[in-house]
Amino acid sequence: MNTHEFSFHGIALRALPSGALFWPEAGLLTVSDLHLGKSARLSAHGGAQLPPYEVRATLERLDADLGFTGATHVVCLGDSFDFPGLESCLPEDDLLWLTRLQAGLRWTWIEGNHDPGPLTLGGEHRAEITLGPLTFRHIATGAVAEVSGHYHPKARLRTKGTTLSRPCFLYDADRLILPAYGTYTGGLSCDRAPLSGLMARDARAILTGPRPMAIPMPGAAGPPRPRARRPA
């Protein structure tokens, strides 16, 4: 599996093609915005009809990422389910699959704006969690060394006369924002507010896909990083 390695606050991280983030030294796999059950919720409320296998597709990717990384701790950065209580409405096979993935691992559910965390499932439930120098939460606050999700960032890359649009990671000196991991979650172009103003002008975008790659973040308009002073 191709990954993109980068450093954030002195920590070597890997961006996976799926949109998951791996911290090898800590054995930590982080995913954001799974939105499990989205198709079921929309169908129940007369919304857009999505293919009914979105939960299974998301769990397949998560299963593969856990197998590839050998992670021992999983942090889900909020909006793991599309609506509070949806975990109790999923097909039994999907719930059993999720339970199997959790077996033997430390599993942390961060509360999101769509759901407070699946309280009926195993694992620990937090508003946020700090591991080493990094704080993991659902929505960026502007704090230093935070890892978050929520915005479902996407970036466009023009190459050979075509335009690619892919979910992406965004990072600058202070913050790191993950793409949505769930199937059919949609996205927000990173050159639009609030992402364009949230990230520093020299921010980078890491496009997901078979070969993750980093590019300058399109549309970044926030304040530049302060330059380190040279010793006198």
Image (tube, helix red, strand yellow):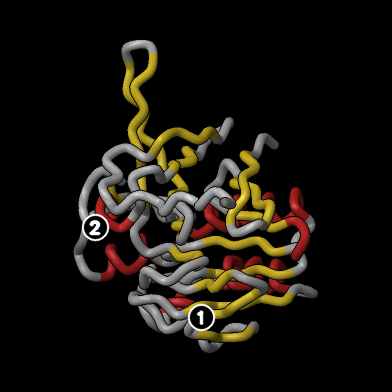
Q: Position of residue 182 (x, y in %)?
A: 46, 56
Which residue is at the front of the view, 163 or 12? 12
On screen, residue 121 versus residue 37, left or right, reads right
Q: Residue at x 22, y 48 (%)?
A: 192
Q: Quadrant of the N terminus?
A: top right
Q: Position of residue 95 (x, y in %)?
A: 59, 72
Looking at the picture, does residue 109 appear above or below residue 14? below
Q: Provide the secondary structure element on which disc 1 rests.
A: loop
Mark number displayed over residue 128 = 1
- Tell me the kind of residue under disc 2: Pro
Tell me the crowding category of disc 2: few under 14, some 14 to 19, or many 20 or more residues within 10 angstroms, Cα based.
Answer: few
On screen, residue 61 versus residue 141, left or right, reads right
> Looking at the image, how many numbered discs can be counted on the residues?
2
On screen, residue 24 versus residue 111, left or right, reads right
Looking at the picture, does residue 63 appear above or below residue 3? below
Mark number displayed over residue 194 = 2
Please identify the residue farthest to the front as the structure is shown: 232
Q: Residue at x 58, y 51 (%)?
A: 231
Q: Residue at x 58, y 31 (%)?
A: 211
- Residue 63: in sight, yes or no? no
Q: Provide the secondary structure element on which disc 2 rests.
A: loop
Q: Position of residue 79 (x, y in %)?
A: 42, 71
Tell me which numbered mark, 2 or 1, is placed earlier along the sequence: 1
Which residue is at the front of the view, 85 or 49? 85
Which residue is at the front of the view, 89 or 26? 26
Mark 1 and mark 2 in contact (Cβ < 8 Å)?
A: no
Which residue is at the front of the view, 47 or 71? 71
- From mark 2 to mark 1, how far is it between C-alphas? 21 Å
Mark number displayed over residue 27 = none
Q: Position of residue 91 (x, y in %)?
A: 52, 70
Q: Residue at x 75, y 56 (%)?
A: 24
- Tell me the kind of residue under disc 1: Glu
